[in-house]
Amino acid sequence: MPNFLRPVDVILAVLILISSFLAWYFLAGAFETPPVSYWSLILLAVLFSFLAGFVALSFLIIESKLSALICALLTILPFFVFFGFNVYYFGAFALFLLLSFAALRKIQREKQFSLKFKALKFVRNGLGIILFALFFMISTASYFSPNVQQFATGGLKLPRYMFDMVLPFAGNLFQQQLPSFSPEKTVDEILNGLLAEQLKELPKDITPAMIEKEKQKFLTEQKQALAEQFGVEFKGEQKLGDLLYDLANEKLNVYLENYKPYIPAFVTSALFLTLLTLISPLKWLAGIFAFLLFELLLASGLIMISTVKTDKEVLSA
């Protein structure tokens, strides 16, 4: 039976295809509906660790380059299913194949020149390259995703969850100048609070009709002044937190107007560099998955470790 038709090769190919399908499927969903929850990030880390571990193990066990090529193809095939086709994806895929071949050679050479068969050590030796290749494919998909490309053409918006995380700290500064400040209060509630302080200084004999007239005048003038100062419309029923969010986005678009075409590249580069920082912990996670599968295959009898004698030439005088 040809080497690439061995049962263990078929099992590894099926596992790679399943883990690849799940990993790229959930990644496509994450790109379509940001922001991504912490649980989704953990799930993606686990799925891509499974995928990298299975690929590294296949590079350790296979005995033919055809099997290696099949494993590499199965790793990326679902990528094109979920992200489509373009010339840049094929360029990234070509780089993935080159890096996969480099990982294969590194794992096989380590196995060839070691006297003891240490599966975990062998697979970890090539996992860094495999993870790097996968992260490059992820970053490429990120660059061409609609949610990243809209930065170059549409209006920029800060992630609301990040803004809400920062707002309480900024709120402490606002409260020093405006004690009644609260993101949950409306604009009218804040202005009415300021007005109440001013009304205390009015003469006692002023009539309710005059108070109401002064109140409406004060609210109108303050909203107009704020609108002229910040360049956004102030609606009385709008919450202050929502207003500040709109104002922050307005200023962001003004400041970054000339740099919008470069933002997708910046976002993608930031994502890629962030992913690279995860290589070390994910190497261990993927290595453990690969080692557990290796032990399972060993226990099932599909693979075995044998001791062989090798002839070696030595120099003598």
Image (tube, rainbow, N blue to C red):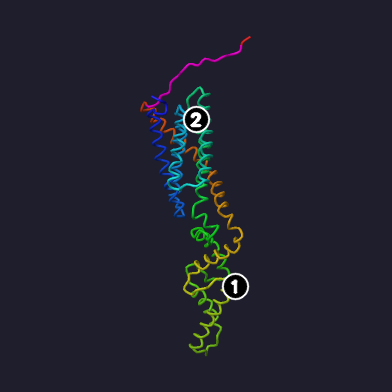
Reading the image, the residue beneath label 2 is 122
Corner quadrant of residue 250: bottom right
Reading the image, the residue beneath label 1 is 229
- Which range is magenta? 302-315
C-alpha separation, residue under disc 1 versus residue under disc 2:
64 Å
Front residue of 76 and 129: 76
Front residue of 285 and 106: 106
**Rendered position, 47 above or below 258:** above
Q: Earlier in the sequence, mark 1 or mark 2?
A: 2
Residue depicted at x 53% and y 84%: 214
Q: Which three-letter amino acid code belongs to the residue tagged 1?
A: Gln
**Rendered position, 281 above or below 40:** above
Residue depicted at x 54% and y 46%: 272
Mark 2 neighbour class, 10 Å CA radius: few under 14, some 14 to 19, many 20 or more: many
**Rendered position, 192 above or below 106:** below
User: Residue 125, position in %: x, y?
Assistant: 52, 32
Q: Which three-letter amino acid code belongs to the residue tagged 2?
A: Phe
Look at the image and tell me whether residue 280 can be seen: no
